[in-house]
Image: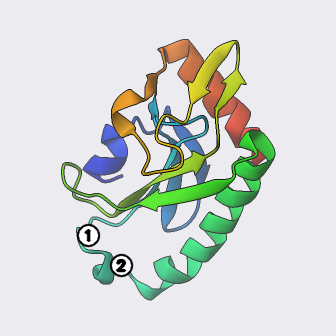
Amino acid sequence: MNPTIQKFGYPGTLVREFDHWVVLLRPAQATLGSLVLAAKSDVTAYSELPREAFAEQREAIGAIERALASFVQYERINYLMLMMVDPNVHFHVIPRYLGERVWAGMSFPDAGWPGPPRLDGAVKLNEDQLQRLVTHLAQEF
């Protein structure tokens, strides 16, 4: 796996794997259910992905949206391709909702609603919480 995937905690954060993509739990939860959709390829430009990765991305996004709709009941979903610090192709997937969601007794507000997501106010999970949320989300897929 490429350095970006490893930086986001692979394999411990792996929720679902495809041939060309992995879905990882974002360790800093901007909103409940925040994920990273990362290409397995070593490329650093979106246009350099193989054709098959683009075709499979549709399948991966469909799976993400079904899983998060069930788990979070989001109102909108944001896909952010930032790639400033972590250069390999990846998207931050941020489910958006008015107010907050509660999971395992923890509150996950959407501080930026209805504007851009607030990544700086993310809830940071400890290792146990991270693993429980990975397991929970993987079951939604």
Q: Amino acid at mark 1?
A: Val
Is 92 placed above or below 128 here? below
Q: Amino acid at mark 2?
A: Leu
Q: In front here: 31 or 40? A: 31
Disc 2 is placed on an element classified as: loop
Name of the residue lying farthest toward the right: 70
Q: In front here: 22 or 125? A: 125
Residue 38, x across and y down, in percent: 43, 57
Is 52 placed above or below 113 here? below
**119 relative to 64 in the view: left or right:** left
**103 relative to 107 in the view: left or right:** right
Is 27 placed above or below 45 here? above
Name of the residue lying farthest toward the front: 114
Badge 2 crowding class, 10 Å Cα cut-off, few under 14, some 14 to 19, many 20 or more, is some
Determine which quarter of the picture holds residue 80: bottom left
Disc 1 is placed on an element classified as: loop
- Residue at 53% x, 42% y is 34
Residue 75, x across and y down, in percent: 69, 53
Q: CA distance from mark 2 to mark 1?
A: 7 Å
Residue matched to label 1:
43
Determine which quarter of the picture holds residue 119: top left
- Residue at 69% x, 38% y is 137
Q: Which mark is residue 49?
A: 2
Total numbered labels: 2
